[in-house]
Image (cartoon, helix red, strand yellow):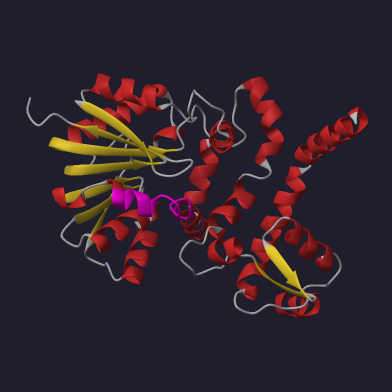
Amino acid sequence: MAGTAIAGSERDVLRLGHAFCEAQALLTAVELGLFTALHDDPATAEEIRVRLGLHGRGLRDLLRLLVALGVLREDEGRFRNSADADRHLVAGLDGYVGSTLLGAKANLYALWDGLTDTLRSGRPRSSPGDFTAMLDDPAEVRRYARMMEGSLGTVVSPLLEAVDWSAHRSVVDVGGCRGGLVGRIVAAWPALAGHVFDLPQLEPVFSEHMAELGLTGKVSFHAGDFFRDPLPRTDLMVFGHVLHNWSWEQRAHLLRAAFRALEPGGVLLVYDRMLDEAFADVDNLVASLIMALVTEEGGEYTVGELRELATSVGFATVDDQRLDANETLVVCRKPATG
């Protein structure tokens, strides 16, 4: 029995160490468009080979690995999506997270190989110049915008329910990219004036997306750099997945900028994959390590740290709630007077 336990433990350790292989299998399937091809149309391995234009070598093993991982089902030699894969990995459907996964494959996968060096040196594996170069490439900007919007998948619905949007006149999403969040908010609350504040290179993809949503002229874009330019005046502001990119001092700068821009009694909404000191949250700890790999001083943070910072800036109340298993919403209210 002891030998069996040791063997099982050994397998668990080895499985964890080789988990990158399973991840790559899933990412490759998304990149190939496998789940989209199987939506409502199960197929044999040969039919899949033809649909996707593949050679065929390794395909059957990949398909069966995906079955073992729970994202495909096999019935009498025909493969179909699992319920979760059909919900989240079919391009063009609500709930699709493939853009986020493809962004991770393109931008993050190789960076993780440098985690040892980052821990030894404290330096990230990317540089500010990499981001600047990306902004100069329109195709890369579009891919980046889709990846950023993919992270909204589990956030939007609970966020729409967590806030009394009817109590506000306007909302500014700082770092709102192509307007995915504000577009959903304004669609649900048409009386609300929507605004996005982001770098000027994002404006073309914002305009395209607003046209796709039928919101041209209903949501405004404000081009600027939030470390140099004032934020638009509003009574409701959103920092979504923004503060984790920056150092403590830079977060303080952004909170002060938000405080100045908010009308008396205004509200700042901050959501991020915040850390919980009471238990080890694997997903959010991974997210924090990603920040170490891609930013100079960024990382996830606790609600307590944000509460302390927001209070020091002048916010009168700071409340928090979970949006989902990973995301936390913090609501900071500016005093109505004074």
Residue 329 in magenta stretch? no
Residue 235, position in %: x, y?
16, 42
Residue nearest the observer in this picture, 102 or 223? 102
The answer to whether residue 230 shows anywhere in this view is: no
76 on left or right of 109 = right
Snapshot quadrant of residue 94: bottom left
Residue at 60 percent across and 71 percent down: it is 36
Snapshot quadrant of residue 271: top left
Image quarter where the C terminus lies is: top left
Residue 303, position in %: x, y?
39, 27
Residue at 28 percent across and 57 percent down: it is 185
Q: Residue furthest left?
A: 337
Residue at 53 percent across and 36 percent down: it is 284
48 on left or right of 172 = right
Q: Residue furthest front?
A: 1
Q: Is residue 31 above or below residue 338?
A: below
Residue 331, position in %: x, y?
28, 35
Residue 160 in magenta stretch? yes
